[in-house]
């Protein structure tokens, strides 16, 4: 096969090689005769102009001895006129011969290298060569892509996705275990409470009751006073709150389903207030799993949905129910203070009472 660029470069190098020999002949003739005609000067200027034109292409192809290659134009520049060369003394003549010969050897070497490359290409099948070039180009593109900022960014995002979702999804490791260990809790709890649950997954289970964010600095109006919660116990909730007319008003199978959905070992925290002479009781229940919490709230919602219109309205007017993951809050009061758990445990104001849905 043939490479047009290589062929043109070889032709120009051959011509430059010839012109360089002519350049020496002009200079040595002037030194020998010590006389230079105007016609010789004109031809010498044309020769230098042609050497300058060929020199640019020569330097583009030259892979080594760049300094010697540039010296060609330095020698041409020193020989401004033949008349000046004619005045060279022996030392200047010797220096010229040495510099010129060094450049001549480089031209000869470069010409031989280009001819060798031309012979090598002539023995190559063009289709195979083009295929190899395309393969090299593809390899270079892949290499550049792998080293690019875009690829690193994509891989970084994929790594974060795998670490965030893939590791627990494949059951390699459950990050929620960090919530149980004392050494990891100081950074695990702020991360999940301030970022993961609000932004990514509100159903991430709480590993301990203490992990739940609690607001102990709620400002209560003067019409609300704190009462003893000694009588507000899990047993009171099971036996009285679920069935009483001041609570959920559950009966029969609906009451049994609700009690069965509430595990006997579920952890309770309670509070009690008086709001404008109305009793306000609050239950904060921690379940071992999200499924348990959903089953319990669903049993209450379904039971209320099945009630008569009168009882349904009464329950909705005195019970507040809300859930986040495996944590359930309940407020019982005829006063609007029954929604106090929103403030206590940072439930958004826009979250509705589950009994209204």
Image (cartoon, rainbow, N blue to C red):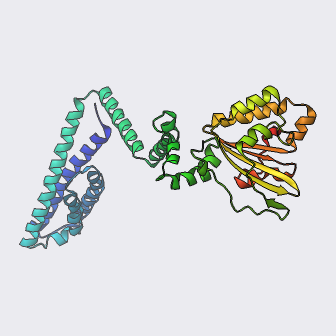
Q: Is residue 133 left or right of residue 234?
A: left
Please tell me whether residue 322 is drawn above or below residue 65 in the rendered image.
above
Is 82 or 311 nearer to us in this picture? 311
Q: Residue at x 19, y 71 (%)?
A: 83
Please tell me whether residue 171 is drawn above or below residue 322 in the rendered image.
above
Look at the image and tell me whether residue 325 can be seen.
no
Q: Quadrant of the N terminus?
A: top left
Look at the image and tell me whether residue 308 can be seen.
yes
Residue 61: image x %, image y %?
A: 27, 49
Residue 208: image x %, image y %?
A: 58, 46
Q: Is residue 103 left or right of residue 51?
A: left
Q: Residue at x 44, y 46 (%)?
A: 152
Picture quadrant where residue 287 is located: top right
Is 333 or 181 nearer to us in this picture? 333
Is 352 or 90 nearer to us in this picture? 352
Q: What is the tally of numbered marks visible in this picture? A: 0
Q: Quadrant of the C terminus?
A: top right
Residue 3: image x %, image y %?
A: 30, 36
Please tell me whether residue 99 is drawn above or below residue 143 in the rendered image.
below
Residue 345: image x %, image y %?
A: 69, 52
Picture quadrant where residue 299 is located: top right
Is 99 or 299 nearer to us in this picture? 299
Please tell me whether residue 75 is drawn above or below residue 172 in the rendered image.
below
Residue furthest to the left in view is 90
Residue furthest to the front in view is 231
Q: Residue at x 27, y 26 (%)?
A: 125
Q: Is residue 63 left or right of residue 357?
A: left
């Amino acid at each position: 096969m043939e490479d047009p660029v290589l062929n043109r470069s070889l032709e120009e190098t051959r011509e430059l090689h010839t012109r360089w020999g002519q350049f020496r002949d002009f200079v040595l003739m002037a030194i020998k005769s010590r006389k230079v005609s105007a016609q010789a000067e004109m031809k010498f200027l044309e020769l230098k102009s042609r050497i300058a034109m060929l020199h640019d292409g020569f330097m583009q192809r030259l892979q080594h001895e760049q300094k010697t290659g540039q010296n060609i134009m330095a020698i041409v520049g020193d020989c401004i006129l033949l008349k000046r060369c004619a005045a060279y003394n022996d030392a200047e003549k010797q220096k010229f011969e040495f510099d010129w010969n060094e450049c001549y050897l480089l031209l000869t070497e470069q010409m031989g290298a280009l001819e060798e490359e031309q012979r090598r290409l002539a023995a190559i099948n063009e289709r195979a060569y083009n295929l190899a070039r395309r393969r090299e180009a593809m390899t270079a593109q892949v290499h550049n892509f792998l080293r690019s900022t875009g690829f690193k960014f994509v891989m970084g995002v994929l790594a974060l996705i795998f670490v965030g979702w893939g590791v627990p999804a494949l059951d390699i490791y459950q990050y929620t275990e960090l919530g149980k260990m004392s050494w990891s809790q100081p950074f695990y709890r702020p991360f999940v409470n301030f970022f993961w649950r609000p932004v990514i997954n509100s159903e991430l289970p709480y590993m301990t009751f203490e992990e739940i964010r609690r607001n102990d600095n709620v400002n209560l109006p003067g019409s609300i006073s704190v009462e003893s919660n000694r009588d507000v116990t899990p047993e009171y909730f099971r036996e009285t709150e679920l069935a009483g007319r001041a609570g959920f008003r559950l009966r029969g199978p609906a009451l049994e389903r609700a009690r069965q959905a509430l595990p006997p070992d579920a952890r309770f925290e309670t509070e009690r207030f008086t709001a404008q002479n109305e009793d306000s009781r609050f239950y904060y229940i921690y379940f071992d799993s999200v499924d348990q919490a959903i089953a319990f709230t669903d049993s209450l919602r379904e039971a209320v949905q099945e009630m008569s219109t009168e009882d349904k309205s009464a329950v909705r007017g005195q019970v507040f129910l809300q859930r986040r993951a495996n944590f359930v809050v309940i407020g019982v009061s005829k006063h609007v203070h029954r929604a106090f758990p929103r403030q206590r445990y940072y439930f958004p104001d826009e979250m509705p009472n589950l009994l209204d849905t």
